[in-house]
Image (cartoon, coloured by chain):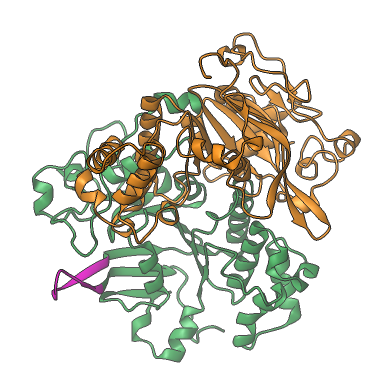
Amino acid sequence: MRTDTPAPPFLDVLTIQDLMVEFPARGPLFSRRTLKAVNGVSLHVAPGETLGLVGESGCGKSTLVRTILGMNKPTAGTVAVGGRNLAGLLNGRRRQERARMQMVFQDPYSSLDPRMTVHEIIAEPLRINGQYTAAAVNRLLEQVGLTEAMGGRRPSEFSGGQRQRVGIARALALKPELLILDEPVSALDVSVQAQVINLLQDLQAELGLSYLFIAHDLSVVRQISHRVAVMYMGRIVETGPVADVFNNPQHPYTRALLSAAPVADPAAAASRQRIVLRGDLPDAANLPSGCSFRTRCPMATEACAAVVPQLLPPVPTQADFPVRPAHQSACLLVHS
Amino acid sequence: MSTTYTGPLLSVQDLTIEVRGDDGPVRLVDGVTFDVHQDEVFALVGESGSGKSLTVLAIMDLLPPGVRIASGRILFRGRDLAQLPEAEMRRLRGKDLAMVFQDPMSALNPLQRVGRQLAEAVKLHASGLNRKQTADKVHSLLAAVGVPDPQGRAASYPHQWSGGMRQRAMIAMAMAHDPGLLIADEPTTALDVTVQAQVMDVLAEARRRAGSAMILITHDLGLVAEAADRVAVMYSGRVVETAGVHQLFSSPAHPYTAGLLASVLGEGTAGERAFAIPGSPPAAAERPAGCAFQPRCHLGSGRDKCTAARPLLTLLPTPPSSAEGAAQPQGMAHPDGAAHPGGRAAACHFAGESTLQLLKGQPV
């Protein structure tokens, strides 16, 4: 129904190729600089798969999401949904295609209109697309663990976890294939986070959804993701199956990130080796030459200033923990 | 005074904080009791709305308008802060009692150079310093928290500082007079993981240098495990468990603590179904009778005792092998007689009954 020529099932739900997003920025005096928010990112999400996107603030995650949703224009590269490049489509058609992916926001307090009832909030996308029935809204409410009666209330009567369920129900209304979840549990209390994570996993199993799951909390990403991509200063520096990346991180940034995350075990905390990075993120309008991580990298050499490392599969080794081909990283030292 | 006083550095006793509501006062903090001793890091853990921030704001005498201490005592070096005149409190605040807030951007004045704001904090309790001495002190404070080029940075404005650097400046400000007690309210929640690690290190080092005790407020059990000596877990305005950090994580006595620990995600749970405590915390005005956690509890749900009577924080027997439990302070008796926050205590009618089973992932 959504498209007259349905995409073949084996195609990735989302394919991003060499995406670049640049913004003009002011330099000293009258000079102009370019801020490279997304600097050559390629990603794909398969049907039924969760790709976890990890990175700290300023790494370009949000710009990437905005560009996928068409709120920013890419400087170069493509975003394809179900194998179809969105940039090449006319507006009406592009809107149709874009309905195949929906967004769940971080803050369930500011992303729901306080004057609307929950029923109306979930009904809105259905009405816009002429698909509204009360039964459809009630089914969505039930799907996310809320009741029909709750639909008559306003968001202010709900707890944070319940509001996020409303946000998920709204995102599911148009039967998308892909949900983009931007920090969906980080505003929630610890005891409620697990409830929402479980709901997302149940919905994925039931509806065959794909997730692009963006979070800074590594334990949450590990819990829900099949694959992970680690982003630093606009680039993907490491990507691979979740267990590979977490158990055998290759890129020094990934290692530092994993080692910095506190572990809820006092005995392990005492003996743990932490890599504490020096300094802060570099200026995105004035990136260091070569590898943008080299200014904070504990292992950087002179060669790192000369070459921009590419995301590459591992070099075959005789190591005890061989790195699998799907596990790629962008570091000269890993590949030398 | 401190030479003769032998009790705990801080003793919060049966503290109740209220706000005016439509149907009479609402108890936001409901009889909180705990001690903090010299040199220790005491973590207050709880979800939003549990009352942990209000508790420390009451200690600092910084409660928002309309919110007041209804009863209880806050003894700092034996003196009741709740009874102290404002002028006396001002002499303590920023000197012997200091606080680091969650969001360094809103705690700093955006229109003033960072150095000037630090100088203000320095001069507040050391008015004899001249301009040069104050500047030197500011620069050494910034250097001590690892701010590179302190002279240059002091002359810049907060927006020119990164989040991690701003929080370092806040720590420098708090440590200006080597406080006896440092209160850190979610000091790294607004920061990224790698920066969080840096700031926690800076905080630990500054605290060690000054010999300050610290109350660390956080919802992050990972940070508790790494930084705290003892922990109080708060739920719906009440302390439900206090214990040494190792005890708390290895054998939580309160079912809420056990539930929180069981819902921690990690290597073991990846890809599996996560444990989740059902429901969500009650609003302060709708706190159920008896135990506030009872409707969500795997132990108490449906048991008469849990709905009938509010469980008091009660001292539990400590295994003799546990060194931290054995170190009992010789403080004053507590109002309810039984609860001694120096040891291991839980507010549950059925404390310890089957919490371990929950942690091992068995069905409950």
Determine which quarter of the picture holds residue B359.
top right
A34 in magenta: yes
**Looking at the picture, how far across and down is residue B115, in whole percent?**
29, 49
- Would you say residue A86 is visible in this rendering? yes
B103 in magenta: no
- Which residue occupies the foreground of this view, B131 or A159? B131
Q: Does residue B313 appear to the left or right of A248 in the view shown? A: right
- Which residue occupies the foreground of this view, A45 or B50? B50
Chain identifier, green in the render? A
Vertical placement of B72 versus B151: above or below? above
- Which residue occupies the foreground of this view, A312 or B85? B85
At 33% across and 36% down in the image, what residue appears? Answer: B128
Chain identifier, orange in the render? B
**Looking at the picture, how far across and down is residue A219, in whole percent?**
48, 44
Q: Main secondary structure of the magenta part?
A: strand
- Please provide the residue range marked out in magenta: A23-37
**Looking at the picture, how far across and down is residue A1, in whole percent?**
57, 84
Vertical placement of A257 versus A308: above or below? above
Q: Residue furthest top?
A: B320
